[in-house]
Image: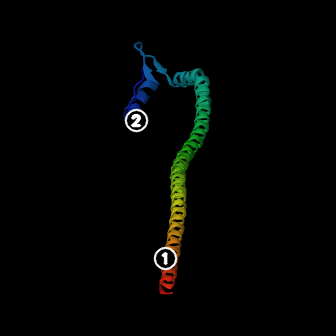
Amino acid sequence: MMTDIGEQAAVEVQPKIEQCESPNGIRVDFTQATVNLAQGLLEVYRPPLEQVKKELIELTNKQETLIGHMHGENAKLCQVQENLDINEMFTTIKIYQAKLANIKKDMTSVHERTNKLKKRATRFQQIKEKEVLLKEQREQEISREHELIGKSSGS
């Protein structure tokens, strides 16, 4: 496990690492060794890291595609919500159509009853007119009889 060290600590340690004395008193220069080790580490880890980089780019592209699809699905869901509002309106229209049909039915019933009442009133009026006519005819007959009786008694 590697730990991060501050820049100042690295500056202090770097010169000590580059030139170090062995216990025999021989000075050893680690500069070339560190360069070689660094290049070796890079050669070992570079291909997997590049592969990871490619995979991350591919993943990012797929995520962007998915985000685009999600926006499309979201738009469809909004449209469905609007369709629900439209369906609610159609339901309301059906309810009002049923109410209108009931009102028409009631109006037809009232119209039929009104026509029946008019016919009945007309019949009653005709009966009354006949009764009045018959009464007048009887009165005329009675008055003729009285006139005839009066003429016959006066002669």
The residue that appears at 62% across and 24% down in the rendered structure is 47
Image-quadrant location for residue 115: bottom right
Between 86 and 45, the one lying in front of the other is: 86
> Looking at numbered disc 1 in the image, what kind of residue is underneath it?
Ile
**Disc 1 residue crowd, few under 14, some 14–19, many 20+, Cα 10 Å:** few
**Apparent side of residue 20 relative to residue 120 in the rendered image (left or right):** left
Please name the residue that numbered disc 2 is placed on.
7
Q: Residue 2 location, x and y as percent? A: 42, 23
Residue 152 vertical position relative to residue 122 in the rendered view, above or below: below
Q: Residue 154 location, x and y as percent? A: 48, 87
Between 72 and 97, the one lying in front of the other is: 97
Q: Residue 28 location, x and y as percent? A: 48, 19
The single residue placed furthest to the bottom in the displayed view is: 155
Q: Which element type, helix, strand or loop, lies under badge 1?
A: helix
The single residue placed furthest to the front in the displayed view is: 155
> Looking at numbered disc 2 in the image, what kind of residue is underneath it?
Glu
The residue that appears at 52% across and 62% down in the rendered structure is 120
Please name the residue that numbered disc 1 is placed on.
142
**Disc 2 residue crowd, few under 14, some 14–19, many 20+, Cα 10 Å:** few
